[in-house]
Every structure is written in C-alpha cells, then in structure tokens.
Image (tube, coloured by chain):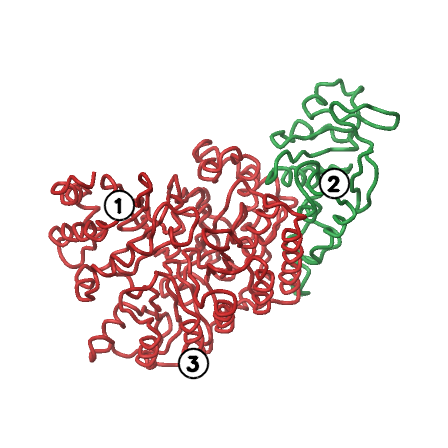
Amino acid sequence: MRRIIRRREIVSDELRYEGEALEPGTHSVPTASQWLAIPAAQRGPALLLRATDELEPLASELDGLRWIVVEFAKPGEGRGFSQARLLRERYGYEGELRARGAFGRDLLFFLARCGFDAFDPHLGEDLEAALGAFETFSVAYQGGSEGIVHVHERAPSL
Amino acid sequence: MYRYDQIDQTLVNERVAQFRDQTQRFLAGALSEDEYRPLRLRNGLYVQRFAPMLRVAIPYGLLSSTQLRTLAHIARRYDRDFAHFTTRQNIQYNWPRIEDVPDILAELASVEMHAIQTSGNSIRNITADHLAGVAPDEIADPRPYCEIIRQWATLHPEFSYLPRKFKFAITAAPADRAASEVHDIGVHLRRGAQGEIGFEILAGGGLGRTPIIGHRIREWLPQADLLAYLEAILRVYNRYGRRDNIHKARVKILMRALGVAEFTRQVEQEFLASADFAPRLRPAQVEHMRSFFTPPPYESLPDQPEPAADAAFCAWYRYNTRAHKISGYRVVIVSLKKHGEAPGDASAAQMEGLAQLAEQHSFGMLRVAHDQNLVLADVAQRALREVWQRLEQLGLATANIGTLTDMICCPGLDFCSLANAGSIAIAKQIHARFDDLDYLYEIGPLEIKMSGCMNACGHHHIGHIGILGVDKHGKEWYQITIGGSSAPPAALGEVIGPSVPKEAVADTIAKLIEVYLRARRDEEERFLDTVRRIGIEPFQERVYATDHSTA
C-alpha cells in the first residue's frame, strides 16, 4: 500500500496509476488528455497533469475533480510550480492538488507554498522525516500561503 | 543601505539551518551527489577543479565596512587569505571545505549576508549601477527597487526551479554602467510626464554561447506593476522555456523561437490574466524601502580644483576618481587590477584596510563594480590625497581605471572546472606587455574583457577587445573579438579571425593598438569608435597578414 503526505499527515493512497490494480475505494488517474476525451458523465474524480499540459482546456471542468496530480517527471522540473499556482489562484481549483515524482523533502516547502496540499515524493524514503520540511521557514517574502508571516505584513504602515 | 528586520534575519537564519541539515545528510550518505547538487548550488556552492567554490551574494554590489571585514575574516579562517570579486558584483572563495560551508553561511547571516541563489537554475543576484545614488546622471536612486526585487526573488516558491539561470540588472542612468542590455531582464528607471517613476523593461539579453542584445518589451511600466510584470515574464519562461537542452534553455532562446512580438504578447496576456492575484507595489512599500537609501550626512563643501601637483596623484585623480552629484565629494574607484595580481582578487588584509578607509572617508560603505573593482562612493575631495596614499600602501591605487589593463577576467582554468583555457596568466601577460602607464594613457579608454570559456563570465563579447579561451587539441588558444560594448548602444564584438596561441595574445593586442593609434582621427576618438568607423578589416590585415603561423 503506497503512502503519501496529505495536509502534513501520512495517509494511504486511494489513487491508482496506469498499470496498477483498482480495488474498491480507489480511483484511477488518467492523463488530462485521456480524461478530457471521456464523456463528462463518465469521468472519474482524478487526473494526472503532465508538465507540458495546458490548463485552459480544464478550466471549465474543474468542478468534477477531487484530485489533480501534477507530475514532476525529472529532478529539476519546475513547470508544476506554475501549474499549481495557476490552478489555485487563477482557476479557483479547491480539490486536492498533489505533487508526484522526482523530488524529495527539500522541495516540499516550495511546493506547499504554490498550493499543493498532497505529496508523493519518489526521492528519499522516509516520509516521517519529510514532514518536518514544512516547518523549514517561518517567514517568506511572497504572499500565497497560510501560516507564514510574509513581508507585506511586517509594517503596520504598509 | 537596507538593514534586515526580524523577518529578513529569520529567513537567512532558517536558510542556514536548512543547508546545515542538507549538508549533514549529504555527508552521512543520505543524500546522493545528484540530489545534493541543486541544493548546494542554490547556496552558491560549486565543486571545482581543486576544491569547492563558494559564491556569496553582494546584492546590487552594496557593502558595509562591517560586511567587508566579515568577508576578510572568512578569507582568513576558511580560505587562503584572499577572495575574488566577480562580474555579478559577488565574491567567490576558492578553497572552502564543504563541511565548513554551513558555518561560513552562519557567519554571513550574522552580518545580513547570504549565498542564496548565487547559482542554480534560479533568479541570481540582482546587479545594478555601482554609482547608484551618487551618479550625477541618474534619474532616481534605483536601489530601493533593487531591494524590492531582491526580496521578491529570494526563495520565490514558483520560480526556484527555472529552465536555467536568470539574471537581472537595474539601472537608472543613461550611461548604463550595469550592462543591462546583456541580461535576461534589464530594468531601466524612467520618469513619466508627472515626474512619477516607472520602468522600461528589456528581456532576452545574454552572453554565453549565444550572445544576444536584449529587446525592449515594455516601454513604460507603472511602478505599481513592477513585480506583477516580472512574475508574468518569469511564468511564461518557466512554463515554456526549453528544459531538454541546457544550451537552449535561457529566456533569450525562447524569445528567439517565439519571436519578440509573440513572446511579448504572451507576457502581456499573462500579466493581464494575473491581475487578481499578482503582487502590487503600494506607494507606502516603496517609501518604506526608500527610507533605507537616504543620502549619508554630507558636509556642505565647495568643489575643489583638480590637483595640479604630483604627477602620480594627478593621474590617479584623473583615472580612478569620478564626478559626484554632491559638491565637494568624489567617487573613488579602487583598482583590483594591479600588475601581477589576478584581476578582481583582493587579500584579507586589503579588505580590512579598505573597510577602515571606508569608515574614515566614505560613511562606512563600499560598492563592488561589475568590472571587478571596488568603489568608495562618497569621499570628500579634501581627503582624496590621503585616501590615495592609503590605497597606495594597500596596493590598490594603480591609476588604470578605464584603460587597457583594467581588464575583466574570469578565474579561468586555474580554478574553474568549466574553463577551456587560463585567463589569469593572459591578464598577467597583457599587464607585462603594457606596464607603462603613460602608454596606457596615450591609448585612452579601452575595455578588455576575457573569459576562459564560452560561458562568458568575463563578458568577452562586450569588450572593446574580447578574449575567449578555447581548447584546441588540449592546448590553450584564444579567439579575439573587437568592437563590443556594454554601454549604449550595446554591441557584440566581431571575431577578427582564427584564434591565436597563448604566447601571442599580448602581441596580438599590441598589433590592434598599433592600427588604432595610426588610424584614429584624434585623441578623443576611442579604440571602440575607430573600430566602428573603419571596420575590422584593417585590424585583421595587421594581425594576420604577416604571420600565417597563427592559423
């Protein structure tokens, strides 16, 4: 049973990717283009977003989604940070936004700040140790995340 | 200068703790080299030819004497008593031990410094005019905006894993002493019809393998929109810049692929579409930032006549000092280009001496210029002779600023694992060939810029004379360009012909100078002007006609 981090807790994963067996209570994760090709009434609640996927085709379909998994296929991949920020801030997506792929705990803080609330890191094994990474910084220079004192709040005159 | 508050200090302290943990995990084997590399790079730590290299940020080149003393202390304690100032107004240590780097970063944090994003595919140190705030020709002080952009760019969660590195330069003066046209983004301060500040935005400039002069993509950007517009540029780049080929990943390549008009359209569209959530600069934020850059307590002093006695002092005054916007003051350029020394290097003792000099004669502040000299920006004219004597004692008064031996030079093959050829030895060769100051003065203003490989850290494309180290069958050869310029109108130099062997570099430059001195209209016409007027052919003829062995 795969485990992931969701809202700073370790939970077992209810999503199943290509080649994985579906069991009761689990959901398959087609790619965004596969998902869009399915008639709306038959679509499941999850999809996988690749780094090159555009967001505009999904913009009017987000209500039917509970899981968007953003793929980080290679170390150093950074497009998913922008995708997440746009999904949250431009398109108003409120379901689970999950980062999955070639990153370890050192990226969790940045990912969370961009709007991800679930994490399936493939580098490094120890999810328990990774939980501490959300506390790496208590301040930030940019807005956009809860629980962080950011710079615009620092002077009452501002 | 900007002073950290509790938030800034907390951020750098937490960054040190984070890197200490990452380094411990690496040394314990829990992080592989591949996993550790992007983390250490984002803290300025490279693994070089002989030892790690640590690059420390000096935001927009501004330093307090206290900070400079700490940099000297780090050189003594963790390095070999010296350090190297770079074309990005940073400082580099060439011999730290990896296990010491967290402690070095902690020492830096104690004086409000860091090494965040001095490498890696992230937004690098923001560079600016080294005469910001004191230059008579500037529109307004750009430093408040530099600091605003520095903070915005620091650990920006969305833009920390870009396709490639990303460099900003900011200037508020028409002379453009920041080489802003060869940066990923150049920000030019402008004044609108009501005197309000706004910006002209250039994008897509850069050197390296594919040198390109930046394109203007916004003629006028209101102050409030500065960060929103920068986010739009970065987001288009982050999403669509190539990630499959490191040599085609800079924003200039994306702009070339899309065309400037289409790139600009996408940026403008992104800018409009992000209006609801993009950061806005409020006037109070700018005012708050401006309060850190108020003028120092200048005395009311009359301008003094230019010195007439003592030829050495007069020459230093003429070449190594610059006009100041306040009467009775002058800017002093501290030459790190002494004959026999690697350009841009300073010893711990020199740094400490300079820190003291800055405290006594320049309100405790210094600047790093992108051409690898240091600057005492606020020296009373009556103190100039004393400052000159003290700089002489420190070996920092070579009266060669703006002349042929005021070369930009990367560390080259002596230190850098990317280099194809040495730079420092060539600098020394040129120094030896042109060691007569009077001859340098006769030649007049001339910028030589040299890189040991095509990554162009030494900005060779924009040197009046550029020198690029190349590897030919395991031997060091040098390709020469002429006609480049970082000042408006910025221009890329043209290659004069086949590269020349190491021992022939200074001789080749001597031939170029010979052609120039014969062809120039008068003493006012600089080398660059002559090249622009007569073209490169006469220079090619002189260099290659008589000696075919260099082919």
Residue at image coords 53%, 65%: B290
In this rendering, which labeled residue sits more in front, label 3 or label 2? 2
Residue B478 visible in rendering? yes
Q: To which chain does the residue with label 1 belong?
A: B
Determine which of the numbered discs, if any, sits on residue B480 in the image: 1
Q: What residue did someone put label 2 on?
A: A119
Q: What residue did someone put label 3 on?
A: B360
Q: So how many labels did they put on this image?
A: 3
In this rendering, which labeled residue sits more in front, label 3 or label 1? 1
> What's the residue type where badge 1 is placed?
Ile
The mark that comes first in sequence, 3 or 1, is: 3
Which of B232/B50 is in front? Answer: B50
Q: To which chain does the residue with label 2 belong?
A: A
Q: To which chain does the residue with label 3 belong?
A: B
User: Quarter holding the C terminus of chain B?
Assistant: top left
> Disc 3 on helix, strand or loop?
helix
Residue B329 vs B531, above or below: the answer is below
Q: Spot the green chain and give its letter.
A: A
Residue at image coords 47%, 35%: B254
> What's the residue type where badge 3 is placed?
Gln
Give left or right: position of B61 versus B432. Answer: right
Give left or right: position of B179 versus A10. Answer: left
Tell me how far mark 3 sits from mark 1, CA to CA. 43 Å
Q: Are marks 3 and 2 on the same chain?
A: no
Q: Spot the red chain and give its letter.
A: B
> What's the residue type where badge 2 is placed?
Phe
